Image (cartoon, grey):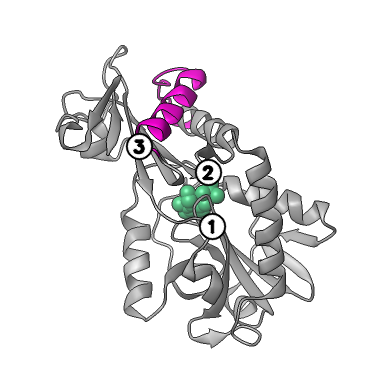
Amino acid sequence: RITYVNGDYLPEAEAKVSIFDRGFLMADGVYEVTTVVGGKLIDFAGHMARLRRSLGELRMDAPTSEDDLLAIHRELVRRNALEEGLIYLQVTRGAADRDFAFPPAGTKPSLVLFTQAGPVLERESVRRGIKVATVPDLRWARRDIKTVQLLAPSLAKMEAKAKGADDAWMVGEDGFVTEGSSNNAYIVAGGKVVTRHLSNAILHGITRASVVRLAAETGMNVEERPFTVAEAKAADEAFITSASAFVTPVVSIDGVALGDGSPGPIAKRMREVYVAESLARAI
Ligand code: PMP
């Protein structure tokens, strides 16, 4: 695999960053994951807009221009002959003496990217639907910033797996679902698609933005508001969205089957509409 590290394309064995990098020491970094299908990037502009916002919220310098970032993504697709999979991009505040205060102006941000090949369009999880288990949301209060602090969602996913589920839906102290460990959460009840509104409590998913828009464009009723675990368990169907999962049906919550326990019609329809539209826009 060929990776990108601060200006160089390197085989993965040579891809290294400093032990003083603030991403390593303090999780002082942000990331994006862009999906590749047919060698093309899905919603690249959306990912770049969110990256810009994450950097701005953390007062971190952009490592390079968005044109350069596009060129790097395309070069990695070419060098790795990547047909289907993802490109991971991470920016950190760079390497400096360990200090809670930001390093001196002029410290260079670190920029690393790598690819991961794997099926995106055809997945067993989509055919079967996934089981989710609810777990407490232990994350910080700025979940809208896509930082590399992923320990809480990693623990959440492990807890869900220990309960026999495929993924976690994280729940706030108020009993309302925030989102999945690495995806946005939706329920469908009485013909309405319900997903939590945008705020600092959840990541503003790029896939979520497309799905909410497409649902409205195809005449579906969308309510952006919080929903409880009890409401979710009583729903007709549910699904998740993310750059890599696209739209993936959820068939049970904490062991309670939704509908007949198989992927629901609205989830399936949303996936078809999303895949068609996002592939048509891929660059
Ligand atoms: N929420 C969280 C917590 C995530 O980590 C992700 C994946 N980045 C998402 C939602 C989905 O966002 P996107 O559609 O941009 O991949």
Q: Position of residue 10 (x, y in %)?
A: 23, 28
Q: Mark 2 = which residue? A: 38
Of 92 and 8, the residue lying toward us: 8
Q: Mark 3 = which residue? A: 80
Q: Position of residue 120 (x, y in %)?
A: 49, 55
Q: Are marks 2 and 1 in contact (CB under 8 Å)?
A: no
* Label 1 secondary element: loop
- Mark 1: which amino acid? Leu
Q: Is mark 1 within 8 Å of ligand 1?
A: no
* Label 2 secondary element: loop
Residue 65 lies left or right of residue 219; in this view the side is left
- Give, as a single range, the part of the protein colored magenta: 57-81
Q: Earlier in the sequence, mark 1 or mark 3?
A: 3
CA–CA distance between discs 2 and 1? 10 Å
At 33% across and 60% down in the image, what residue appears?
A: 154
CA–CA distance between discs 2 and 3? 13 Å
Q: Position of residue 238 (x, y in %)?
A: 62, 72
